Amino acid sequence: MQQPDLLDALVQTKRLGNLLIEIFDLTTQLAEAVDREDQVSIQMLLAMRREPIDKLDLANGALKKKQQSLPEEDAQQLASLLNGGPAGSPGEDKLVEQVAANHRLLERLVALDQNVNRKLTRDKSVYTNGQTQKNG
């Protein structure tokens, strides 16, 4: 994979990581508001989370677009790296590390979100037995 492509992928994964941190912080504040039963803060924090979630979606889309623009072999290598695969060259190490950090943070965020969702919705939670319900 060419160095500029690798650098672009790293920039996008760092952007994803920063957005995950922002969402995690807001979700932590949301959990505290739920524990306090502060309905005004709950509504405000739910609205505030929407923007970084939308930005996360856009950053993911940009990363997928980048992957699709690459030659097939490079696209497969990038897909492997983004899915937690090992670095194939020394230049890919930073991307692999960022992907792993994002994955760890995402796992923590999902666990926190499940907890908050269950507290807010009780038996109507979108999460059941650790899985997201399918709508439709």
Image: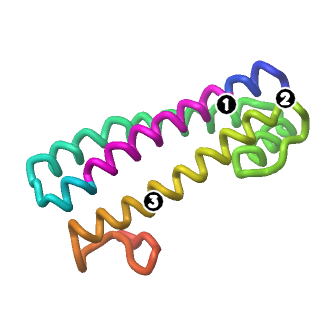
The picture places residue 84, in percent across and down from the top left corner, at 73, 51
Q: In front of the other: label 2 or label 1?
A: 2
Looking at the rendered structure, the secondary structure element under dot 1 is helix
Can residue 14 be found in the magenta stretch? yes
Asked whether the residues under the numbered discs 3 and 2 touch, taking CB atoms below 8 Å apart as contact, a structural biologist would say no
Q: Amino acid at mark 3?
A: Val
The picture places residue 47, in percent across and down from the top left corner, at 22, 42
Q: Residue furthest right?
A: 89
Please say if 8 is above or below 84.
above
Query: Would you name the residue on which mark 1 appears?
Result: 66
Query: Would you name the residue on which mark 3 appears?
Result: 110
Quadrant in the picture for residue 95: top right
- Horizontal side, residue 85 vs residue 39: left or right: right
Q: Amino acid at mark 1?
A: Lys
Q: Which residues are magenta?
A: 9-30
Please say if 110 is above or below 68.
below
**How far apart are labels 1 and 3 at the CA level?**
26 Å
Looking at the rendered structure, the secondary structure element under dot 2 is helix
Q: Residue furthest top?
A: 4
Q: In front of the other: label 1 or label 3?
A: 3
Q: Earlier in the sequence, mark 3 or mark 2?
A: 2
Please say if 50 is above or below 122.
above
Looking at the rendered structure, the secondary structure element under dot 3 is helix
